[in-house]
Image (cartoon, rainbow, N blue to C red):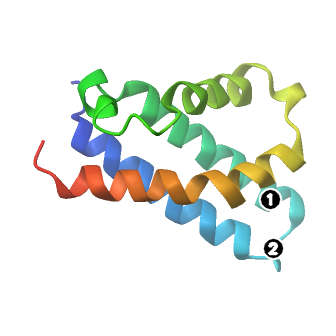
């Protein structure tokens, strides 16, 4: 059964919320925290990859292809992961993505 774009948008919103929670939690074990962040970025990328082109076209300012590419890096080229780059993505790129996902979720699909 193929999941609808609405479900994928919900998955992305949930992953963003989880990433923000883990990024803010400086009390947890650093390795577990990093693994949780990377896993949720992987989920986010997989959900983006599965979104329909029509849905993505409604928010052309989002770098959908690069988000899907991050998923490929995390899953298949894990040895190239740069912690500083991941931190930058979390700090600078999640906000605009979150805004776009909120707008897409508010429109009927």
Name, please, the residue furthest toward the bottom.
Answer: 27
Q: Is residue 68 above or below residue 97?
A: above
Say what secondary structure mark 2 lies in.
loop
Left or right of 27 on screen, residue 25 = left
Report whether 48 appears left or right of 56.
Answer: right
Nearer to the camera, 83 or 78 = 83
User: Residue beneath label 1, please?
Assistant: 32
Quadrant position of the N terminus in the picture: top left
Residue 60, image x, y percentages: 39, 34
Task: Say which residue appears at 12% left-offset and 41% top-offset.
Answer: 109
How far from the left and from the top, in percent, is residue 79?
89, 26
Residue that appears at 51% across and 65% down: 17
Say which mark, if any, is on residue 43: none
Residue contact between numbered discs 1 and 2, judged by CB atoms under 8 Å: yes
Circle 2 is placed at which residue position?
28
Q: Residue at x 85, y 34 (%)?
A: 81
Residue 4 location, quadrant: top left
User: Which of the 4 quarters of the picture holds residue 14?
Assistant: bottom left
Secondary structure at numbered mark 1? helix
Pick out the residue farthest to the left.
Answer: 108
Q: Disc 1 to disc 2, how far (Cα)? A: 7 Å
21, above or below 83, in the image: below
């Amino acid at each position: 059964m193929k999941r609808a774009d609405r479900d994928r948008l919900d998955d992305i919103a949930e992953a963003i919320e989880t990433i923000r929670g883990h990024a803010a939690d400086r009390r947890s074990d650093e390795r577990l925290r990093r693994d949780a962040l990377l896993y949720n970025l992987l989920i986010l990328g997989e959900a983006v990859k599965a979104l329909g082109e029509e849905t993505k076209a409604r928010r052309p300012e989002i770098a959908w292809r690069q988000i899907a590419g991050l998923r490929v890096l995390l899953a298949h080229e894990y040895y190239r992961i740069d912690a500083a780059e991941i931190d930058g993505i979390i700090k600078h790129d999640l906000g605009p993505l979150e805004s776009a996902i909120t707008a897409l979720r508010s429109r009927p699909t």
